[in-house]
Image (spheres, coloured by chain):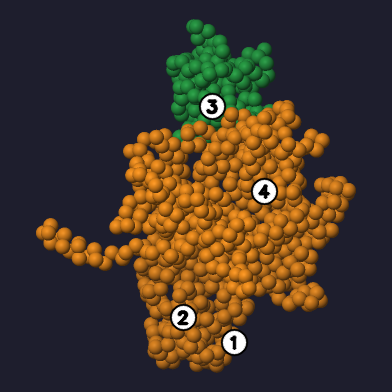
């Protein structure tokens, strides 16, 4: 395929994607001329270019569509549902031909006569808006309307149809053949983008486009500013770049460790560190795309499904600007489609049933995307009938997945997990939309393949929520390195909730045994333990806990929580995930491998599979809910503080404001006049030394070697450093009230039963504004001249 | 088609030359066609993988990828060798790469297809499935290895069957 054709294909696909989006909106606002113009442009561009490339079938179909769209745009025809249905068919028809061109190089043999016939039938005079009988065949009269070019805004349009015509911004319409007018003045609507290149790129591009460029009569795609600021890049090239950046991250890690002892190299490797981090971020950004790319396909699908299934559904979309790695976006496309299908077929009831149940006949389907830590959460929520847990239980027993008595004590949450078993369906009849029991299995497999998780929540009668938690990126994840069997293993930090250290002398007592099952009391609850060594070396006897330091990594994964006992703990690292060969993946407890900073290889443990392998039960929902409630209640009334000690006195810093804690040699603190400052990663950080840590009383002149601790905090838009002697703990503080008043005392909090002063970050005076410097500069320039 | 015909002619002419890299495991000399070798890593200690099948020699880091290695020694049921071993990075079908752990690597030999003999029927079944015949050299026999047959994917499929 030559370059020109490929370019054409990509552009046309984008155009059709845009058209699809507009089409569903058009159904709600049939008079929106901006939408109509947008759709018209998409089809028109295809038609123009095909003629040039010689795709006759495509041209014929696009031409028929364009004629109909022309009438719509001129307001001679109203965009009633049957018209939209045919236009959607046109869209599918165009797509099919484009697909044929892409795969076979030719337009294929299909016959479009019937579609073209329907397109033309709609243009018949009977269908036209009756109020303008004269305009249909008389292009001359139309010019009078078109001349009113001072009315390009769509908002002014009164409801009457003739007014809609007036609002259509046409000035070039005065040609002999109004239906084929090729020069269009684009109305300045925000959602239009006349440059096809823009769709792939982000809003930046889209915003830059609204220049109202005229689509030229020639077949060449219009040139606009978007084409200059964006660039089409092959995804494989981006993948390759990502791999290389991954390698760079590894090499950096190694260099950082190797040069730690050499001060000269430390400086250099710090720079390398920064550059690598920046580079990584930009490459990752280049791969990011808003989820609207897949969300926007949903309205159309929903419309079709509603017609097939006789449902009335309102679609709400939230957070479609949330960005996700391109490959991940591709990976969740199918799961999302399945989830929406499921919601419509099994979730939302037909209107009559909804009315009978006392609900709004129109169901609501909510698609929501949001960031949550290092994950993106995509939710599909419906207000339908929910899942009958009893049905699931019966079906699971029927299919022999569990025994009846086991089913009896399984929690709802556990039972719902059966929905993900291949071939499991509670639907009594298979429809052509869903019910074959494949959907949920696909959802889980696809999401887990990319390191995500799926959860399902359902309340009978109220609806179902399917939640997919997707990692932001695949390649690089933060992990904690643990040791066992004299080897390093990486535990992804996403599933790690806390770490417990058991000193040697407490080892026997802390770990309790219940007939061979090791347990640990974690804040009053029994936590099942898994010995990593025992898991990796079947037959090894772990029943005698060794008298040495033991560490329990408390892992929480897919609703199962357990403690993984390891021998040792190394630093957390950002690791680059390398895939394992299928042979090793099949073992089931490794999700990949990585190269550590010291050059050693480490296997990445898969907490989910370990839990399943060790037979850890899902913790019941009530327990989790309880735990969550406790935490929430606590958090609602309390603010977390970082408890520090400065020159013997305790002080508290609001944890939310703490950015990082740095240990720096005293010599790195410099002074501007009397103000201590720290040159921190190339930026000047004012240092607050209220506690007198820098110059402890009674100390003589010191060498710059002494290490001091600086807590870097956020204060408004700037950052300040607080010097402290020790960082003690993190604790939640309670408000204090002055006796006899109900007024909250400011500046103090009750931390660990002690009244503690809160450091007033706002009180740190800003550094001087460098206005006087200007004078100095000019003086210097003069002196230099 | 032309390729197959060419191969047949070559056999009939009986003088087709094959270049092999000879490696040693225990007392036996093996040969690997050099076209399949991407790189020879002199000495390395592969990272062990607990719970892996016996024939897996461990993992090695090779140009940004983590490769699974197959230990020829363990594949043939011998004890793993202590100390460093040599690794041949091999490419099998479909661009998949893996490492082959051997005791030592010696020179590249050019052998004539006239000296080739298929596996003898007396060889036990396991070895018959791994070896691809032998070349009769002056110094002794050189056992042919076929990277396709040593691919860990294939080995795992076999052991599962």
Q: Identify residue for label 2.
A: A179
Q: Is residue A208 visible?
A: yes
Can marks 1 and 4 be said to lie on one chain? yes
Q: For numbered disc 1, what is the local secondary structure?
A: helix
Q: Quadrant of the C terminus of chain A?
A: bottom left
Q: Secondary structure at mark 3?
A: loop
Position of A497 relative to B103 (above/below): below
Q: Which residue is mark 4?
A: A556
State if disc 2 and disc 3 touch (CB < 8 Å).
no
Mark 4 element type: strand
Foreground mark, 1 or 4, reads 4
What residue is at 65 percent from the left and 33 percent from the top?
Answer: A504
Q: CA distance from mark 1 to mark 3?
A: 80 Å
The residue labelled by disc 3 is B46
Q: Earlier in the sequence, mark 1 or mark 4?
A: 1
Q: CA distance from mark 1 to mark 4?
A: 66 Å
User: In this view of the protein, which residue sits in the foreground, A153 or A515?
Assistant: A515
Residue drawn at the location 79% of the way across and 65% of the way down: A460
């Amino acid at each position: 395929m030559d370059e020109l054709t490929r370019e054409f294909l990509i552009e046309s696909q984008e155009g059709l994607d845009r058209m699809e989006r507009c089409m569903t909106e058009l159904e709600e606002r049939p008079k929106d001329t901006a939408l109509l113009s947008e759709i018209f442009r998409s089809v028109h561009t295809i038609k123009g270019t095909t003629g040039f490339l010689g795709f006759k079938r495509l041209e014929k179909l696009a031409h028929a569509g364009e004629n109909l769209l022309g009438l719509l745009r001129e307001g001679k025809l109203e965009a009633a549902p049957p018209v939209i249905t045919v236009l959607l068919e046109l869209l599918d028809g165009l797509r099919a031909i484009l697909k044929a061109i892409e795969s076979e190089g030719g337009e294929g043999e299909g016959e479009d006569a019937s579609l073209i016939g329907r397109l033309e039938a709609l243009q018949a005079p009977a269908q036209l808006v009756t109020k303008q009988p004269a305009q249909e065949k008389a292009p001359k009269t139309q010019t009078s309307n078109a001349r009113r070019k001072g009315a390009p805004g769509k908002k002014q349009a009164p409801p009457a149809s003739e007014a809609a015509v007036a609002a259509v911004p046409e000035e070039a319409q005065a040609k002999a053949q109004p239906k084929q007018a090729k020069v269009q003045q684009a109305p300045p609507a925000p959602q239009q983008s006349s440059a096809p290149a823009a769709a792939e790129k982000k809003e930046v591009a889209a915003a830059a486009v609204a220049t109202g460029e005229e689509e030229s009569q020639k077949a060449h795609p219009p040139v606009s500013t978007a084409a200059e600021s964006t660039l089409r890049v092959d995804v494989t090239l981006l993948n390759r770049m990502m791999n290389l950046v991954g390698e760079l991250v590894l090499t950096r890690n190694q260099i950082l460790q190797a040069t730690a002892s050499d001060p000269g190299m430390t400086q250099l490797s710090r720079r390398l560190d920064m550059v690598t981090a920046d580079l990584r971020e930009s490459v990752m950004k280049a791969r990011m795309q808003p989820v609207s790319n897949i969300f926007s396909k949903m309205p159309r699908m929903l419309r079709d499904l509603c017609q097939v299934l006789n449902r009335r559904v309102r679609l709400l979309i939230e957070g479609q600007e949330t960005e996700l790695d391109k490959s991940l976006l591709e990976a969740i496309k199918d799961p999302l489609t399945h989830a929406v299908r499921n919601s419509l077929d099994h979730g939302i009831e037909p209107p009559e049933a909804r009315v009978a149940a006392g609900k709004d006949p129109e169901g609501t389907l909510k698609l929501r995307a949001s960031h949550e830590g290092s994950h993106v959460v995509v939710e599909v929520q419906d207000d339908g009938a929910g899942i009958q847990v009893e049905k699931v239980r019966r079906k699971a027993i029927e299919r022999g997945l569990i025994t009846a008595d086991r089913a009896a004590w399984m929690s709802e949450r556990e039972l719902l997990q059966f929905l993900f078993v291949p071939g499991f369906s509670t639907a009594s009849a298979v429809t052509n939309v869903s019910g074959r029991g494949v959907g949920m299995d696909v959802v889980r497999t696809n999401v887990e393949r990319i390191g995500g998780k799926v959860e399902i929540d359902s309340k009978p009668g109220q609806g179902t929520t399917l939640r997919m938690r997707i990692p932001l990126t695949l390649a690089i994840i933060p992990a904690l390195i643990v040791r066992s069997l004299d080897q390093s293993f990486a535990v992804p930090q996403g599933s790690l909730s806390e770490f417990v250290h058991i000193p040697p002398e407490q080892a026997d007592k802390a770990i309790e045994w219940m007939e061979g099952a090791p347990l640990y009391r974690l804040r009053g609850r029994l936590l099942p333990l898994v010995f990593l060594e025992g898991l990796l070396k079947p037959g090894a006897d772990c029943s005698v806990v060794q008298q040495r330091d033991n560490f329990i990594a408390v892992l929480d994964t897919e609703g199962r929580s357990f403690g993984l006992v390891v021998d040792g703990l190394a630093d957390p690292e950002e690791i680059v995930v390398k895939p394992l060969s299928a042979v090793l993946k099949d073992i089931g407890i490794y999700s990949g491998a990585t190269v550590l900073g010291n050059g050693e290889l480490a296997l990445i443990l898969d907490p989910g599979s370990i839990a399943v392998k060790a037979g850890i039960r899902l913790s019941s929902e009530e327990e989790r809910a309880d735990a969550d409630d406790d935490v929430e209640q606590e958090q609602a009334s309390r603010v977390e503080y970082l408890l520090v000690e400065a020159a013997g006195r305790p002080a508290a810093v609001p944890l939310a404001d703490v950015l990082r804690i740095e240990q720096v040699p005293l010599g790195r603190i410099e002074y501007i006049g009397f103000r201590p400052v720290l040159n921190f990663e190339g930026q000047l950080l004012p240092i607050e030394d209220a506690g007198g840590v820098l110059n402890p009383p009674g100390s003589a002149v010191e060498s710059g070697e002494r290490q001091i601790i600086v807590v870097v905090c956020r204060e408004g838009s700037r950052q300040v450093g607080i010097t402290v002697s020790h960082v003690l703990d993190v604790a939640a503080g309670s408000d204090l009230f002055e006796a006899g008043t109900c007024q909250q005392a400011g500046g103090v909090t009750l931390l660990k039963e002690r009244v503690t002063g809160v450091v007033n970050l706002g009180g740190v005076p800003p550094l001087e504004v460098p206005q006087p410097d200007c004078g100095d500069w000019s003086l210097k320039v003069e002196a230099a001249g | 088609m032309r390729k197959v015909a060419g191969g047949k002619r070559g056999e009939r002419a009986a003088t087709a030359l094959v270049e092999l890299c000879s490696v040693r495991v225990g007392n036996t000399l093996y040969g690997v066609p050099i076209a399949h070798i991407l790189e020879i890593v002199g000495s390395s200690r592969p990272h062990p993988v607990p719970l892996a099948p016996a024939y897996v020699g461990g993992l090695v880091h090779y140009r940004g990828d983590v490769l699974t290695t197959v230990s020829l020694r363990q594949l043939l049921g011998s004890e793993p060798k202590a100390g460093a071993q040599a690794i041949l990075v091999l490419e099998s079908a479909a661009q998949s790469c893996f490492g082959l752990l051997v005791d030592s690597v010696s020179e590249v030999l050019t052998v004539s297809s006239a000296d080739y003999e298929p596996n003898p029927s007396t060889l036990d079944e396991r070895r018959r499935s791994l070896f691809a015949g032998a070349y009769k050299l002056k110094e002794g026999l050189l056992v042919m290895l076929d990277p396709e047959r040593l691919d860990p994917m294939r080995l795992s499929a076999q052991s599962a069957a």
